[in-house]
Amino acid sequence: MDIKTASALRRLRLVSAPEAVSFLLLLVCSVLKRTTDFNAVPVMGMVHGVLFVLYVIFWADAWSRAKWSPKTAVLYFVLSVLPTGGFFAERKLRREAENAVNAAIAARARQEQQEQQEQDGAVQA
């Protein structure tokens, strides 16, 4: 995984949990608006709207860079419109990033081992 793909996944992961929190707060504000005189819906609506737009932009960037299958891309999008889906998306993206880092480390270790074996073979010859 290259640095741009890792950055795209990280941006999506970092915005997913705040987007989920803002969605839940917007729902709470909607209930409070109808049951009390408290009306924070315009403010929370704007905050959630901005975070949702960022999520969609970062989702599209991550999809194109990570070369997700359509099924994976749809899953991450559906998680963005569920009230607690952002938390699941964040957890899944963190696992995906960890797996990618582990794979990159393993590939680098194999490459170094192969280079060392080639050097050892050249010294013996």
Image (tube, grey):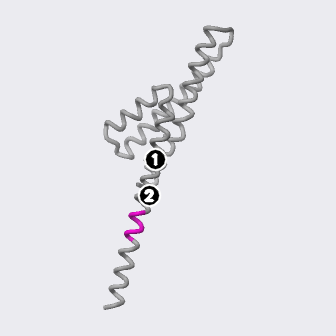
Q: Nearer the viewer, residue 27 or 50?
A: 27
Q: Which residues are magenta?
A: 106-111
> Which image quadrant: the C terminus?
bottom left
How far across and how far down the image is residue 118, in percent?
A: 34, 80
Tell me which corner region of the image, top left, top right, bottom left or bottom right, holds residue 46. top right
Residue holding disc 1? 95
User: In front here: 97 or 6?
Assistant: 97
Q: Position of residue 32 (x, y in %)?
A: 63, 13
**How far, Cα to Cα, is label 1 from label 2?**
10 Å
Q: Secondary structure at mark 1?
A: helix
Quarter of the picture containing the N terminus is: bottom left
Image point (43%, 47%), residue name: 96
Q: Residue at x 36, y 33 (%)?
A: 74
Name the chief secondary structure element in magenta: helix
Can you give x and y, in whole percent of width and height, for residue 121 in the image? 33, 85
User: Quarter-wise, where is residue 72 in the image?
Assistant: top left
Q: Residue at x 46, y 45 (%)?
A: 9
Residue that lies at the very extreme toward the right in this rendered image:
37
Q: Earlier in the sequence, mark 1 or mark 2?
A: 1
- Residue located beneath label 2 in the image: 102
**At 53% from the left edge and 30% from the top edge, which residue is drawn?**
20
Q: Does dot 2 land on a helix, a strand or a loop?
A: helix
In the image: residue 14, left or right of residue 120? right
